[in-house]
Amino acid sequence: MDKDTLDQTRRELRRFVREKLVPLEKQVADEDRIPDEIRRSFAEMGLYGISIPEEFGGLGLAMDEEVELVFELGWTSPAFRSLFGTNVGIGSQGILIDGTPEQKQAWLPKLASGEVTASFALTEPEAGSDAASVKTRAEKQGDHYIVNGTKRFITNAPHAGIFTLMARTDPNNKGAGGVTAFIVEAKTPGITIGKPDKKMGQRGSHTADVIFDNAKVPAANIIGGKEGQGFKTAMKVLDRGRLHISAMCVGAAERLIHESVSYARDRKQFGQAIAEFQLIQAMLADSRTEAYAARCMVRDAARRYAAGETVSLEASACKLFASEMVGRVADRAVQIHGGSGYIQEFAVERFYRDVRLFRLYEGTSQIQQLVIAKQMLRQAEAGQDA
Ligand SMILES: Cc1cc2nc3c(=O)[nH]c(=O)nc-3n(C[C@H](O)[C@H](O)[C@H](O)COP(=O)(O)OP(=O)(O)OC[C@H]3O[C@@H](n4cnc5c(N)ncnc54)[C@H](O)[C@@H]3O)c2cc1C
């Protein structure tokens, strides 16, 4: 996208977020539902297709362009982004990078337009951080696979038209090499969606179990057509996903800082605005500094990703720093609000709960640390400096 068009898109999104979405935040949290007209607006703005090439009807943004839009989206409740987030990430990218030409033609235009929602089904009751240990089994029978197993915490499962399913096709290979990625239509007989989970925050976004009971999936639905490639596919799109989440954290931190500054200027104690107290100023300054650092990190890594560099270490470093950073910023925001920060009427109370998730999904902070350290040791082995 040329710079002027990107700039205009970003400005329009900023206006939409601040004028339309922010006033709806409380309603969405109370009703645990995003209004249909907002869903339609997201589709009209092309947000379902941010990362899908124009030839398939998407906006076709490069990663450094995508994060500029995501910074804007982070300003409001993350539940809004969640509605189309799965179409932007692994739901579409796995098909885009490794899918066959038929799979791309069949699904990418529908994902880009928002006609179909894609969910990513990897986590299981006994396989979380150790994702390569998935037990869901896909057993070959002629030109089909029979799938049995349970997937847990699957975002958008209640709304999904397709699942990108990670299942074990080779029971003798207990590691990543035995796992295959499938495109599975949600209406396939034998698939049941559990009751939506009651979450700590991000109300309006829904996760649920997905249970496969002898679900019959055509062999033609293996992403890329080859068994045992599922994990490689997932890894290829992970860097992009982690940068996307990091940009969300930056946007959310900036919103929390905005709320903190305006509260601190209004609230008076000891005869003056609390913003005049240097101990409050220290909290504001720390939050602003950390958010700025995260913004710079995300921009740098996204630019390098867009230029074709491998940025697994940097993407994990961004996810680790940005998600922990927004946790600290949210905590300070509550502190600056005093008792009011604990009351639901104030946005910071909701954001405090909403942003907690960023340290948990798409790899916990501990998993990011492991990825970073592993790459560092690999580089040292190869005699490379940072
Ligand atoms: C709201 C929500 C939405 C989600 N959406 C999806 C989705 O759409 N699709 C999907 O597939 N999954 C999804 N997940 C699942 C999410 O990715 C996992 O919850 C996450 O990866 C952690 O796995 P776990 O919950 O099993 O925790 P565990 O892996 O059991 O971890 C528990 C603790 O142990 C730590 N730990 C684990 N292994 C190590 C280690 N080797 N070294 C040090 N510490 C370790 C972890 O960091 C954590 O602190 C979602 C989860 C939530 C809560």
Image: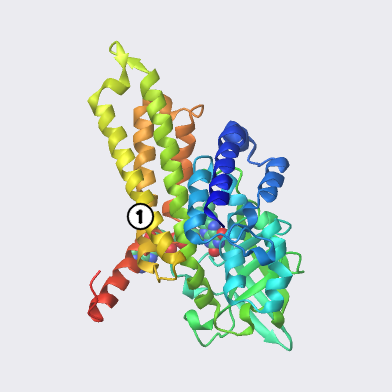
In front of the other: 71 or 84? 71
Q: Is residue 241 above or below residue 354?
A: below
Query: What is the quadrant of residue 277 in the picture?
Result: top left
Residue corresponding to mark 1: 297
The answer to whether residue 346 shows anywhere in this view is yes
Whole-percent x, y for residue 179 in the image: 54, 79
Whole-percent x, y for residue 322 in the image: 38, 51
Q: Is mark 1 within 8 Å of ligand 1?
A: no
Q: Give the left or right position of residue 60, taking residue 327 as reference.
A: right
Give the tally of numbered discs: 1
Q: Is residue 213 above or below residue 219?
A: above
Residue drawn at point x = 55 percent, y = 77 percent: 230
Residue drawn at point x = 48 percent, y = 79 percent: 176
Query: What is the quadrant of residue 165 in the picture?
Result: bottom right
Residue drawn at point x = 62 percent, y = 72 percent: 95
Q: Work out which quarter of the rendered image holds the N terminus and state it.
A: bottom right
Q: Work out which quarter of the rendered image holds the C terminus and state it.
A: bottom left
The answer to whether residue 128 shows anywhere in this view is no
Whole-percent x, y for residue 319 in the image: 40, 57
Q: Give the left or right position of residue 51, taking residue 368 as reference.
A: right
What's the amino acid at mark 1?
A: Met
Q: Is residue 358 above or below residue 343?
A: below
Say what secondary structure mark 1 lies in: helix
